[in-house]
Image (cartoon, rainbow, N blue to C red):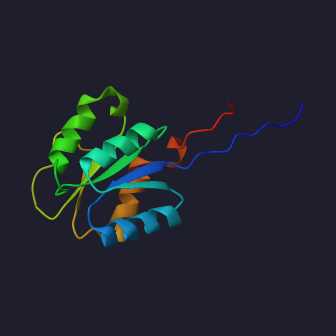
């Protein structure tokens, strides 16, 4: 019988950040480390992207996004059972306690090594899904 292997899907990370330069730098760094990266600029777009993804292991959430802020998006994610297992790391320039429902916090400006450490911690290699043929 032939050896059938299934490709491993890289861990998926969603970056919710309205600054295009910051968003782009984060995406490039994560992609270079083997993560599959999706991006959104606000809560509405983030919810749409997450619903379309098969699974995301991590959302990197800017706390000060336009329209619905990071707190509002975090509350929506925690209220929706589809996203119950998705970890959220909040990115903010403000000092303060870890928001309820968040898995971690990064201080802005985010240093890329801190970003990568958080992604590796919340999306270890064994969290990648194995893609099975349809």
Residue at the outermost top position? 81
Q: Residue 52, located in which quarter of the rendered image? A: top left
User: Could one spot residue 101 in this view of the protein?
Assistant: no
Residue 123 position, x and y percent, is 44, 48
Q: Tell me which residue sits at (67%, 44%) in the image.
A: 7
Residue 105 screen position, x and y as percent: 23, 54
Residue drawn at (83%, 37%) of the image: 3
Q: Is residue 112 above or below residue 56?
A: below
Q: Depth check: 110 or 44 in front?
A: 44
Horizontally, residue 95 falls left or right of residue 10, namely left
Judged left or right of residue 49, residue 110 is: left
Quadrant for the C terminus in the image: top right
Where 44 sits versus 95, above or below?
above
Which x, y percent locates residue 29?
44, 68
Q: Is residue 90 left or right of residue 121?
A: left
Q: Place residue 114 in its image quadrant.
A: bottom left
Can you give x and y, in whole percent of width and height, for residue 110 in the image?
A: 27, 68
Position of the N terminus by quadrant: top right
Residue 15 visible from this viewpoint = yes
Residue at horizontal 36%, vertical 39%?
A: 86
In this picture, residue 3 sits left or right of residue 74: right
Q: How many marks?
A: 0
Residue appearing at x 15%, y 65% in the figure: 93
């Amino acid at each position: 019988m032939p050896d059938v292997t299934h490709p491993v899907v890289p861990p998926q990370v969603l970056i919710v950040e309205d600054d295009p330069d910051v968003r782009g730098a984060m995406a490039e760094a994560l992609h270079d480390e083997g993560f599959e990266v999706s991006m959104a600029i606000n809560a509405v777009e983030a919810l749409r992207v997450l619903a379309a993804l098969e699974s995301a292991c991590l959302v990197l959430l800017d706390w000060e996004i336009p329209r619905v802020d990071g707190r509002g998006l975090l509350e929506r994610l925690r209220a929706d059972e589809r996203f119950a297992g998705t970890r959220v790391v909040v990115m903010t320039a403000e000092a303060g306690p870890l928001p309820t429902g968040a898995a971690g916090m990064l201080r802005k400006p985010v240093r890329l090594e801190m970003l990568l450490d958080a992604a590796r911690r919340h999306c270890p290699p064994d969290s990648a899904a194995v893609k099975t043929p349809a």
